[in-house]
Image: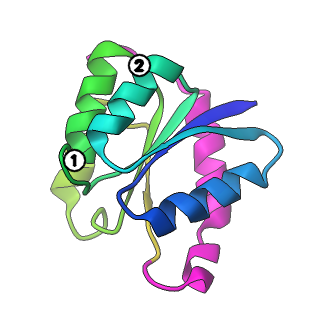
Amino acid sequence: MIRVIIADDSSFMRKVLSDLFTETPDFEVVGTASDGSEAVKMVFRLKPDLVTMDVNMPLMNGLEALEMIMEGCPTPVVMLSSLTKKDADETIRALQLGAVDFITKAGGSVSKIDTIKDEILEKSRNAATAKVKKL
């Protein structure tokens, strides 16, 4: 069982990802966070196998949270963002900080989200087995 925390400021995306992982037998959602600060606290407390992390969030963005996670409780993280294709600097920075992989969010309707479900599950399974270490 892959224990996952979902960090995204969009309640819609948290719900969609939670439903996707909950419906998949080898995943268990152990927590959801609406900002990076909350995600860091959850990771330290719950010690999940995987974190899916949005890049742009209030209070503490995904890159700042990723850095704190990798410094204090190294955990495989898959970044999700609508920006990664447009903004290569954020992609490179996240990889430097220890992110295992990226998924570009499909914007808008549920049908667009459906188009990346297989990618989310595949990359999440692969990332959960990654060996990560402190920065």
Q: Quadrant of the C terminus?
A: top left
Snapshot quadrant of residue 37: top left
For mark 2, give the secondary structure.
Answer: helix
For mark 1, give the secondary structure.
Answer: loop
Residue 7 appears left or right of 135: right
Q: Amino acid at mark 2?
A: Phe
Residue lying at 58% horizontally and 58% vertically, measured from the top left: 17
Snapshot quadrant of residue 93: top left
Residue lying at 83% horizontally and 44% vertically, measured from the top left: 25
* Region in magenta: 107-135
User: Percent from the top left, x then y, of residue 71?
Assistant: 27, 17
Report which residue position mark 1 lands on. Answer: 61
Residue lying at 54% horizontally and 33% vertically, measured from the top left: 50
Residue 95 in view of the camera = no
Q: Amino acid at mark 1?
A: Asn
Up-down: is 99 above or below 90? Answer: above
User: Percent from the top left, x then y, of residue 2?
Assistant: 69, 32
Report which residue position mark 2 lands on. Answer: 44
